[in-house]
Amino acid sequence: MAATVTTSAWALDSEEHEEELKQETPTAPPTSDFPDLMTAAATTTKKNKGQTLSLGEFVKLTF
């Protein structure tokens, strides 16, 4: 029974602390460092075709 009381007290303390943190930290305005998802999805980037290597060439380069 004592474990239940301790767990309940811990849970209540945790919830109170979480509410305090939410009140202390103001929400930051969105930054324009990154485009929104719609803009990013509409933008296409040209990808260069990679260099073709044989397995032997690849093994030489990795060691």
Image: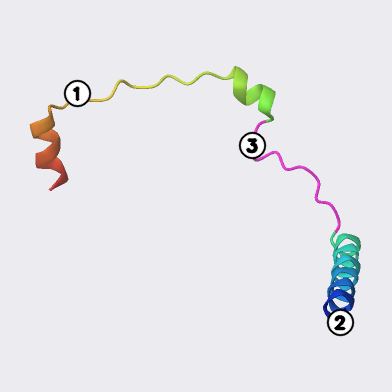
Task: Determine which quarter of the picture holds residue 32.
Answer: top right
Q: Are marks 3 and 1 in contact (CB under 8 Å)?
A: no
Query: Secondary structure under badge 3?
Result: loop
State yes or no: discs 2 and 1 in contact (Cβ < 8 Å). Answer: no
Q: Which residues are magenta?
A: 26-35
Residue 23 or 48: which is nearer the viewer?
Answer: 23
Quadrant where the N terminus is found in the figure: bottom right
Check disc 1 and report the residue beneath it: 52
Q: How is the image coloured?
A: rainbow
Packing grade of label 1 (10 A; few <14, some 14-19, many >=20) is: few
Residues packed near mark 2 inside 10 Å, few (<14), some (14 to 19) or many (20 plus): few
User: Of the residues shown, which amino acid type is indicated by label 3?
Assistant: Phe
Rendering coords of residue 40 (x, y %):
61, 25
Indicate whether 18 appears above or below 60: below
Sequence-wise first label, 2 or 1: 2
Q: Amino acid at mark 1?
A: Thr
Which mark lies nearer to you, 3 or 1? 1
Sequence-wise first label, 3 or 2: 2
How far is the residue under mark 3 from the one under mark 2? 51 Å
Numbered tag placed on residue 2 in the rendering: 2
Circles 3 and 2, Cβ within 8 Å, touching? The answer is no
User: Viewer-proximal residue, 62 or 9?
Assistant: 9
